[in-house]
Amino acid sequence: MSGFQVQGWCPGALRPMPSGDGLVVRVRPALGRLTGAQARGLAAAAGAFGNGWIELSARGNVQLRGVSEAGHPGLIAALSALGLIDPDAEAERRRNILVTPFADAATLALAAAVQGVLAQMPALPAKFGFAVDTGPAPVLSAVAADIRLERSADGRLLVRCDGAALGAPVEDAAAAVVALARWFVAAGGVSGGRGRIARLIARGAVPPDALAGRIAPAAPAPAPVPGLRPEGALVAVAFGRMRAGTLAALGALGPVRMTPWRMLLIEGATRLPALPEVITDPADPILRVAACPGAPDCLQGLAPVRTLARRLAPGVPAGRVLHVSGCAKGCAHPGAADVTLVATGAGFDLIRDGAPGAPPMQRGLSADTLDPKDLF
């Protein structure tokens, strides 16, 4: 299987990442929220300074694609006017906080408190992140995060290390998060600028007594699907990719809450929007398929993948997941899927019940002859 380059960091707005179609500029909306005006302004900036395509990341952020080096300063000025730029790249990097899109006022206040103490954190790996998931039942359990704020079944506020089954009850959540981050570094969780707290826990490390887990969080909620919710309308776009005009149209309906499921929640909406790129049917088979940009948009992509993914989607059975990846890195779905197809430059490798880097069952399959009846 062909290799790939691990960057070790994620793109930002102030530190974009080169790709096959230009710079990828990732915008991190504060607390995962965009006002309607910000959503419309972001869409306009994507068209003026990029190629007009917008992606939703698995971290609840927005990516603008096709930005040129010459156009980047103008884009930053536009984003700054919208209130979407941090003071510097380091502040942007640290603000890796994922907030449940179904948050109430208390959860948003907790998230703001965590954001307010980021400057007190030690130097952390670029991908070290936090999840504020303090609704009645966690919805972010399957999303990568190192330190989690959750609630127990009886409503107590918990801080929990990723990789640990139990959390510790806390009153000052922000102070507890800082203490856990400091413990992670002091306990040797960082090596060569990288590290995740789950790996430290797996090595047998135990947080200090006051932060050691002893209470289980509430059972996770079912995976969210498009539809109306008490908070508004939850909608999806295929592979998390949409034209700028789609985001503008959604922003015209109300404030937009980001999600890590490549969906958006239109706050306060009481009707599902009827827009060409917007998916509102939870049974739509495209939702069973994950696919990255692939070649030529991604420099590491070894084949185009989204056309193939669309062709195969109608044959993916309900309740199953197909991942079509442009390389073995598997950015669109790093974990295990029922079926994973990995481009190698000499066809596709087939992996069953595994992640993109797992040993394949078959190699060199032709995209032209792949049939979902043979995959499931």
Image (cartoon, rainbow, N blue to C red):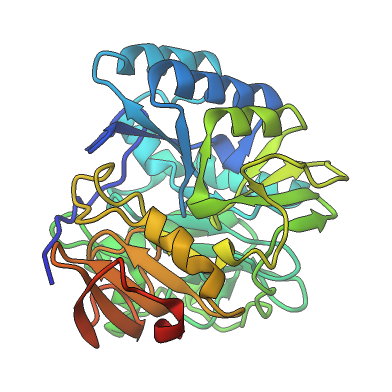
Residue at image x 61%, y 78%?
Answer: 318
Question: In the rendering, at what x and y percent does residue 22 appear?
Answer: 26, 30
Residue at image x 64%, y 55%?
Answer: 100
Residue at image x 62%, y 61%?
Answer: 133
> How many marks can you see?
0
Residue at image x 72%, y 60%?
Answer: 281
Question: In the rendering, at what x and y percent does residue 66 appear?
Answer: 33, 29
Which of the image's four quarters has the N terminus? Answer: bottom left
Q: Is residue 364 above or below residue 242?
A: below
Question: In the rendering, at what x and y percent does residue 332 appear?
Answer: 39, 59
Q: Is residue 246 above or below residue 104?
A: above
Location of residue 161 (image quadrant)? bottom left
Residue 289 lies left or right of residue 253; in this view the side is left
Residue 190 lies left or right of residue 256; in this view the side is left
Residue 239 lies left or right of residue 41; in this view the side is left
Q: Quick check: can you spot residue 95?
A: yes
Q: Is residue 263 above or below residue 25?
A: below
Seen as rendered, the residue at the extreme right is: 270
Observer-nearest residue: 296 or 156?
A: 296
Q: Quick check: can you spot residue 83?
A: no
Question: In the rendering, at what x and y percent does residue 194 appear?
Answer: 21, 58
Observer-nearest residue: 108 or 21?
A: 21
Q: Is residue 139 above or below residue 73?
A: below
Location of residue 10 (image quadrant)? top left
Observer-nearest residue: 339 or 221?
A: 339
Observer-nearest residue: 158 or 143?
A: 143
